[in-house]
Image: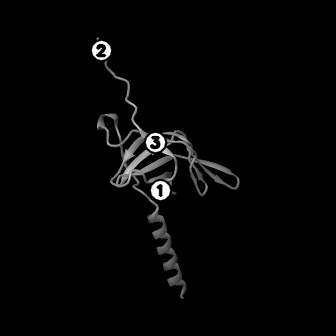
Amino acid sequence: MSMKSTSLFLLSTLAFLLSSCAGSSHPRLVTPSGGPISPRYLEIYSEPHTATLHFPAGVYTLNAVDKIGYYHRAPRKIAEHFGGGSLWREGGIFVSKRDPQKLRGYVYRAGAITHVGNFSGVKHAFREQPLASATSDF
């Protein structure tokens, strides 16, 4: 195999791997006036992790949507552990539109969302919490 062929193979393999785990780089933000499209809250009872990423237990809030699912923002940043310490990343839990019991983690890397892991087996519950009324009943 020539050097050019090897380089082309490695480059195409890298492109495939990077595109296979990337989600939508810019999902649409969900606004309160947008109406309910999915339960607003996702409660995760334990701390799921995948490889070096550790997601906090707690209540995740619906934040964005794209054509394949819903993005619930973590209550705190996600810890990415490495040999000398930790990095803290924005992210949360992704819920598939096709199968709402299919959960994955997501983190922001290089300006895009990267889906990670399979958290479908993590104990969780979807719930709605009505917002306090903005008007009073006089």
User: Which residue was labeled with disc 3?
Assistant: 125
Q: Nearer the viewer, mark 1 or mark 2?
A: 2
Return the mark for residue 23: none
Q: Position of residue 112 (x, y in %)?
A: 45, 54
Tell me where residue 135 sits by quadrant.
top left
Q: CA distance from mark 3 to mark 1?
A: 20 Å
Question: Which image quadrant: the N terminus?
Answer: bottom right
- Label 1 sits on a secondary structure element that is strand
Q: What residue is drawn where x is 55% and y is 42%?
A: 57
User: Which residue was labeled with disc 1?
Assistant: 115
Q: What amino acid type should be assigned to the residue bearing mark 1?
A: His
User: Which residue was labeled with disc 2?
Assistant: 137
Q: What amino acid type should be assigned to the residue bearing mark 2?
A: Asp
Specify few, some or many for label 3: CA neighbours under 10 Å numbering under 14, 14-19, or 20 or more: few
Specify few, some or many for label 1: CA neighbours under 10 Å numbering under 14, 14-19, or 20 or more: many
Q: Is residue 74 left or right of residue 100?
A: right
Q: Position of residue 118 (x, y in %)?
A: 50, 57
